[in-house]
Image (spheres, rainbow, N blue to C red):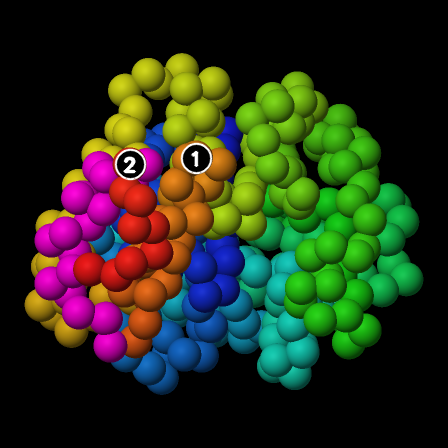
Amino acid sequence: MNRKVSVAPMMDCTDRHERYFLRLISKNVLLYTEMVVSEAIDRGDKKKLLSFNLDEKPVALQLGGSSPRLLSNAAKIGEDFGYDEINLNLGCPSKKVQKNKFGACLIKDPHLVADCLNEMQSKTKLPVTVKTRIGYDDVEDYESLFNFINLLKSTGIKTFIIHARKAMLGKFTPKQNLNIPPLKYEMVYKLKKDFKDLEIIINGGITSTTDIKNHLDKVDGVMIGRSVYHSPYILADIEKEIFKNENILTREEIIQKLIPYVKNETKKGTRLNQIMRHTLGLFHGQTGASYWKRYLSENMCVRDADVKKIDHIMDKIKYNNADTRVGQSA
């Protein structure tokens, strides 16, 4: 599994439509699902929760939960659905997640985490990985992080994705937890020095190929998140500069290839806005980007959007720069 660059699991962002769209841009980055709760998989519609398009691969399933039994069953079900990796979420700090005693609050109970990981690995042949933070609340010293990783390593886990911020449990909103706690990359670098046999992937505040290259000098891989969602074509730069792949689709070609997917999905009952909302940032930084966002927002990112408008979208792109009637709807 190539984890040199991956796209982080993001709630309300990295659903199957987003992953299909991102895969049109990049053939090499590893993609992750949104966090799926193990109890939901146990009780809910497994096909609705876990089905995905094989063109998305490689793709990892991220699980949330604290029951060794439910997590291990979910891991096996994820394997049966065709995922390439199972990841355990130990980083989400939201109050809802804390209430259900999983996510970042599990860092407080490392032995329960170890039990979960042992059970998960016993049920699946897929690699099981961990995504965690450097600490929580007032616990952010390196010794505590070292001991936590060392215990989980003893279960056989070989890959750790480390968000280089601590989680402030019950004190900050999820958005604040992504910005306010300071980034401490040096702690992650030190982990790699102390655990040379582990695959250490760094996450948090990484926004450019320059950032990625700098981190790859010190760790095994880089996970990027919000920067990809807001400006997805950064993956084209990553393909060229990190993976040395020059066979990249243009933005226009990406939309052309997305259209058949959109038509097929809407026939199954998917709403147009559920797919096209993910493309709002495709032209970020380009002439006409504001027109693109406005056109989508007014015509394709509303709940009752008419799927027939997808047939005219290439004309909107083609004549974007020359169109003096910017802002008019088709």
Q: Is residue 187 above or below residue 135?
A: above
Question: Up-down: is 103 above or below 33?
Answer: below
User: Which residue matches tag 2?
Assistant: 322
Secondary structure category for the residue under label 1: loop
Q: Between 60 and 253, which is closer to the camera in this rendering?
A: 253
Q: Earlier in the sequence, mark 1 or mark 2?
A: 1
Q: Nearer the viewer, residue 254 or 42?
A: 254
Task: Judge depth for marks 1 and 2 and give the one in front.
Answer: 2
Q: Position of residue 268 (x, y in %)?
A: 12, 70
SS at mark 2? loop
The amino acid sitting under disc 2 is Ala
* Residue 37 seen by the camera: yes
Is 69 positioned to the left or the right of 26 in the image? right
- C-alpha gap between disc 1 and disc 2: 14 Å
Is residue 266 rendered to the left or right of residue 112?
A: left
Check disc 1: other Cα within 10 Å, few if <14, some if 14-19, many if 20+. Answer: few
In-front residue for pair 303/153: 303
Q: Pinpoint residue 184: horizontal percent, then vertical percent.
A: 81, 41
Asked if 71 appears above or below 55 in the picture, the reply is below
Q: Which residues are magenta?
A: 304-321
Residue drawn 36% across the image and 84% down it = 43
Q: Which residue is mark 1?
A: 286
x 77%, y 37%: residue: 185
Q: Label the magenta part by its dominant secondary structure.
A: helix
Name the quadrant containing residue 27. top left
Q: Residue at x 33, y 65 (%)?
A: 298
Q: Is residue 317 magenta?
A: yes
Q: Position of residue 312 (x, y in %)?
A: 14, 52
Left or right of 321, for residue 128: right
In the image, is residue 135 above or below residue 210?
Answer: below
Does the image show residue 47?
no
Pick the quarter of the image with the C terminus. bottom left
